């Protein structure tokens, strides 16, 4: 889909559809008032008789509005001005996306970027318009024998900016929005693929393909024999029950100076998680194909960063494996030795994500990182604690955690901090090894992070638990592509901070 920005008055726009906001109670936006004046009160009459009262998400299509060059006007309810916030703005855009699918117009010109949203500038509003429109058009039908007809609706959206000097800002926002959207779609595609297709080998192949698309990315894939030589006994213990060979994938994006320390992203890549010997209940086990969404988000983020050609160095590390029961599978009570040398008593084989991440986090040291962020669908306890709106963030460096929270707010991909207090570490004590891989029922998300913290003492680190946000269940089941927007925005913010 094509996006553009332009500056001009609404009555002068020759387009198939002009999009105008109306707030409650029955109040026209600035663009609406201009149209109303040129049409000699046409819109005021429509509003006065109750066809549009400005209720949030309400839409009304008008044809042949006097004095305009537009074939149609799409009036969109924006709710009360005092209630207009980021969440409601996205609801408005969602309503517009749905309405545009059914009105027959191939292009539209939107004045929703003119809405007064406290604390949000034109870059943010253009960015959200692009991402929302792209998201609404996403479909996953690769594996269906009969495909749906392509989504109808517009092929081009022009967004208004206040003045000509804002055109550059808008164009930059379009570029960023398209790059993030492409990364989100790639992440969704990988997440939605079934485990018999999206294997560890498949993830490795897609990472290699990404490096062929973007020469600034260099991909290396370590095999199980390589991991054995590195002493990755923890990661390999999870792979022991699978016939699919584990892979350790590293992708290096070189956009910055060679001396610049990279942002390192580590994504959990369990391509199917049965729980191993500690077998999960059968209900909804099909959704355990999504246990590699952390890995998928790393690939999607690297894609977005490379697409924008950001002048920063980024490394993606993906430990990829299945977790299945087998005669050779790891058993509860087994003790393994991690790459760091710490021994781990595996009390539950379904707490496998931390077992593969800990070796990947040790491996991250070789890149001399600026910061390390791991992303994982790690604990069901996270969903109990926070629901499915924010991801959880925990880390050993307060400024890094705060930066992630701030970046998440910018793109409405929110995170919420949980504590990493020493008192929780006691729950991981083992009578037979240095550390146990679970800490009991209480504070499950926190103790999982406590486990990972044992392997991150040499650098600044944050952990994102995306168990509640990586996919949705029910009739709209599918991967969400989160937290690609958050990670990409963080990298942009970090880049700007480095540049001073």
Image (cartoon, rainbow, N blue to C red):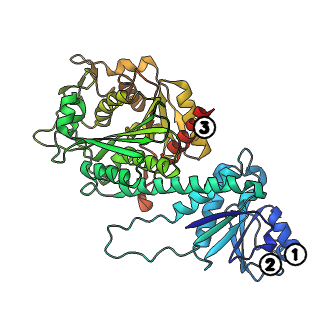
Q: CA distance from mark 1 to mark 2?
A: 8 Å
Q: What residue sits 56% from the left and 41% below the top? A: 492
Relative side of 95 to 192, left or right: right
N-terminal of the pair, mark 1 or mark 3, is 1
Q: CA distance from mark 1 to mark 3?
A: 44 Å
Q: Residue 449, position in %: x, y?
A: 40, 29
Query: Callout 2 environment at 10 Å: few (<14), some (14 to 19), or many (20+)?
Result: many
Label 1–label 3 contact, CB within 8 A: no
Q: Which residue is mark 1?
A: 38
Q: Residue 461, position in %: x, y?
A: 45, 28
Closest to the observer: 317 or 421?
Answer: 317
* Residue lying furthest left: 327
Relative side of 319 to 497, left or right: left
N-terminal of the pair, mark 3 or mark 2, is 2
Q: Which residue is mark 3?
A: 496
Q: Which residue is mark 2?
A: 68
Q: Residue 351, position in %: x, y?
A: 29, 35
Q: What residue sits 84% from the left and 77% below the top? A: 42
Relative side of 283 to 149, left or right: left
Residue 444 in sight from this viewpoint: yes
Q: What residue sits 39% from the left and 44% below the top? A: 294
Q: Identify the image quadrant of the C terminus.
A: top right
Up/down of 276 relative to 105, above or below: above
């Amino acid at each position: 889909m094509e996006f553009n920005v332009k500056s001009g008055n609404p009555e002068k726009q020759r387009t198939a559809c002009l999009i105008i906001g109306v707030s409650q109670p029955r109040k026209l936006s600035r663009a609406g008032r201009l149209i109303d004046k040129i049409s000699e009160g046409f819109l005021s009459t429509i509003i006065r008789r109750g066809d549009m009262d400005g209720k949030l998400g309400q839409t009304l299509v008008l044809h042949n509005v006097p004095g305009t060059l537009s074939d149609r006007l799409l009036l969109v309810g924006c709710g009360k001005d005092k209630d207009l916030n980021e969440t409601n703005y996205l609801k408005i855009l969602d309503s517009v996306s749905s309405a545009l699918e059914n009105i027959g117009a191939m292009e539209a010109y939107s004045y929703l970027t003119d809405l007064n949203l406290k604390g949000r500038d034109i870059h943010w509003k253009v960015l959200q318009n692009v991402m929302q429109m792209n998201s609404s058009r996403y479909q996953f039908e690769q594996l269906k024998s009969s495909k749906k007809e392509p989504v109808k609706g517009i092929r081009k959206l022009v967004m208004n900016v206040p003045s000509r000097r804002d055109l550059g800002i808008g164009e930059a926002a379009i570029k960023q929005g398209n790059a993030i959207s492409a990364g989100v779609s790639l992440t969704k595609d990988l997440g939605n693929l079934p485990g018999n297709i999206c294997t560890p080998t498949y993830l490795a192949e897609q990472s290699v393909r990404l490096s062929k698309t973007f020469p600034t990315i260099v991909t290396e894939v370590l095999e199980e024999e390589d991991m054995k030589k590195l002493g990755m006994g923890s990661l390999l213990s999870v792979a022991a029950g699978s016939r699919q060979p584990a892979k350790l994938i590293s992708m290096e994006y070189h956009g910055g100076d060679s001396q610049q320390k990279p942002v390192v992203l580590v994504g959990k890549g369990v391509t199917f998680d049965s729980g191993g010997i500690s077998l999960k209940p059968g209900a909804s086990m099909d959704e355990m194909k999504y246990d590699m969404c952390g890995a998928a988000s790393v690939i999607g983020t690297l894609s977005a960063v490379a697409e924008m050609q950001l002048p920063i160095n980024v490394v993606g590390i993906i430990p990829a494996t299945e977790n299945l029961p087998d005669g050779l599978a790891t058993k509860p009570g087994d003790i393994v030795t991690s790459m760091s040398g710490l021994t781990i008593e595996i009390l539950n084989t379904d707490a496998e994500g931390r077992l593969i991440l800990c070796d990947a986090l040790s491996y991250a040291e070789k890149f001399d990182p600026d910061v390390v962020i791991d992303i994982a669908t790690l604990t069901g306890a996270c969903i109990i604690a926070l629901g499915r709106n924010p991801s959880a963030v925990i880390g050993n460096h307060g400024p890094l955690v705060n930066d992630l929270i701030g970046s998440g707010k910018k793109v409405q991909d929110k995170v919420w901090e949980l504590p990493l207090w020493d008192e929780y570490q006691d729950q991981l004590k083992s009578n037979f090894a240095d550390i146990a891989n679970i800490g009991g029922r209480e504070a499950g998300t926190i103790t999982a992070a406590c486990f990972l913290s044992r392997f991150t003492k040499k650098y600044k680190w944050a952990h994102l638990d995306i168990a509640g946000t990586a996919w949705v269940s029910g009739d709209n089941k599918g991967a969400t592509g989160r937290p690609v927007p958050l990670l990409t925005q963080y990298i942009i913010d970090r880049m700007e901070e480095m540049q001073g």
